[in-house]
Image (spheres, grey):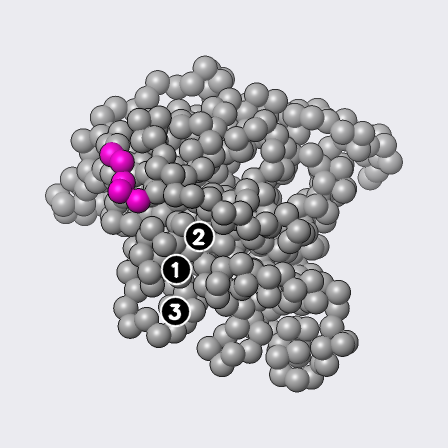
Amino acid sequence: MMGDFVKRALPGVATAAAALAAVAGYDAVLHADPGQQTTLGTEIVGSAGQAAAPAPQPSCDTAQPASGHSFATPWGPVQVVAEVDSAGRVCRADAAVYPDGDSRSQMINSRAIPQLNAAVENRGVEFDAVSGATYTSEAYRDSLQSILDSL
Amino acid sequence: MIPAGAGRPEPLRSARPLRCSFPVMGTVASLTIAAHRPGPGGRGALHRAAGEVRRCLVEDDERFSRYRPTSELERYRGGRIARQRLSAHMLEVMRDCESLERLTDGAFRPRDAAGMFDPTGYVKGWAMERAVQAAIAAGARDVCLNVGGDVRTAGAAAADRPWRVGVRSPSNGSRIIAVVAAPHRGAPIAVATSGRYERGNHLWSALGHLAEAPADIAVTVVGGDAGIVDAGATAVWVRAATSGTAAGLAMLDRWDGCEGMLALGGELLASAGMTPFLVGHGAQAA
């Protein structure tokens, strides 16, 4: 197994930043880094970059709503309803229940919903699994992966 | 009651993927086996493959657990088994860990704070590798296995779509900061992420001498082997936290087939060859 894991010497080469476009969920803020890495983008916090829900993908014409799943967000629980197509792929996610609370949570929620939608739908790019730092069984229950598993 | 057709392989009535999730290794494993390429074993083969994945992971959990006094690992650590009596699996993991420690110049350290052998940073990935191989041997072709945030895929999600792995934001679990896929159709990929935002103490102790480590660094490493990217993500994280992000990412340039990216304070930095793995940048979109 380890045989393929071979060292190789590679001189520092600056990657062409111009070849990169926006990462989904990020805006295209591109600039070359002095080192040998490339800066891919700058995280957008807030609703500015998340204007409207994108149009459904063609494969989603026959999408069916899946059962709701309560999803803990930093701003409170959100009931998520996702639509899946005949192959079980996520087409669209939406919040069916907004968190109760004061005006602040209402305000924050107005940007949490597009973020959730963007996360599950990722602007039309579906995904099958979520990679992140190792979660415990408890943290799994609140994870995006558990939404995918519940569909 | 015996259903009609019992004893014969169940035909693939639908292309619906087989999905299951179960707790193992202190976390949750999520398995998807796609059904777009029916094999000779029909849908029953997919169920058997899922059973193999579970069997392998549970077996390795029992062998390598740090939380079971009766595990082979804990018996070895406690001096209750001599090295020459260890299983072939334990010896393989030990050899791999020694190689990885050398290759990472010590940034990957398979020992606990007391200096005793502890393969925790590698063995989950190693077990995932074994589990996916067992699924393939059982007749599955298109597999996506996620164990606690580390992912290993084989084949593709559909005839026209690769497996895609979202990488979550270190500061917001509901946000995806990048989507990773194989650069070539059907090629297997392994994706591992290290960060302190879930259970950071293992990284904290790996640093040892470092008084303060940034909490919001997350390192994602992609490659072809789940064990190597598991250890690699830890090693790059440790190097980035101690010597800076450039030093961390530069480690990846020495490993054939491994690339990675590092999220810090809302910025994403990537190794020189990461682009072909990123959907929207170079990876196949469909």
Mark 2 residue element: helix
Between marks 3 and 1, how big is the CA–CA gap? 9 Å
Between marks 2 and 3, how big is the CA–CA gap? 17 Å
Residues beneath discs 2 and 1 located on the same chain: yes
Q: Which of A134/A98 is in front?
A: A134
Residue tagged 3 = B207
Between marks 2 and 1, how big is the CA–CA gap? 8 Å
Magenta region, main secondary structure = loop
Q: Earlier in the sequence, mark 3 or mark 1?
A: 3
- The residue drawn where x is 29% and y is 72% is B211
Q: Chain of mark 3?
A: B
Please say whether residue A133 is visible from this viewpoint: no
Residue tagged 1 = B239
Q: Nearer the viewer, mark 3 or mark 1?
A: 1
Q: Badge 1 local density, few (<14 within 10 Å), some, or many (20+)?
A: many
Where in the figure is residue B275, as x and y percent of width and height?
42, 33
Asked if residue B264 is positioned above or below residue A95 in the image, the reply reads below
Where in the figure is residue A50, as x and y percent of width and height?
24, 29
- The residue drawn where x is 38% and y is 39% is A13
Q: Is residue A34 magenta?
A: yes
The answer to whether the residue labelled 3 contacts the one labelled 1, judged by CB atoms less than 8 Å apart, is no
Q: Is residue B35 magenta?
A: no
Residue tagged 2 = B251
Asked if residue A28 is positioned above or below residue B190 in the image, the reply reads above
Q: Amino acid at mark 3?
A: Leu
Q: Which of A61/A22 is in front?
A: A22
Mark 3 residue element: helix
Q: Chain of mark 1?
A: B
- The residue drawn where x is 43% and y is 69% is B206
Q: Quadrant of residue B157?
A: top right
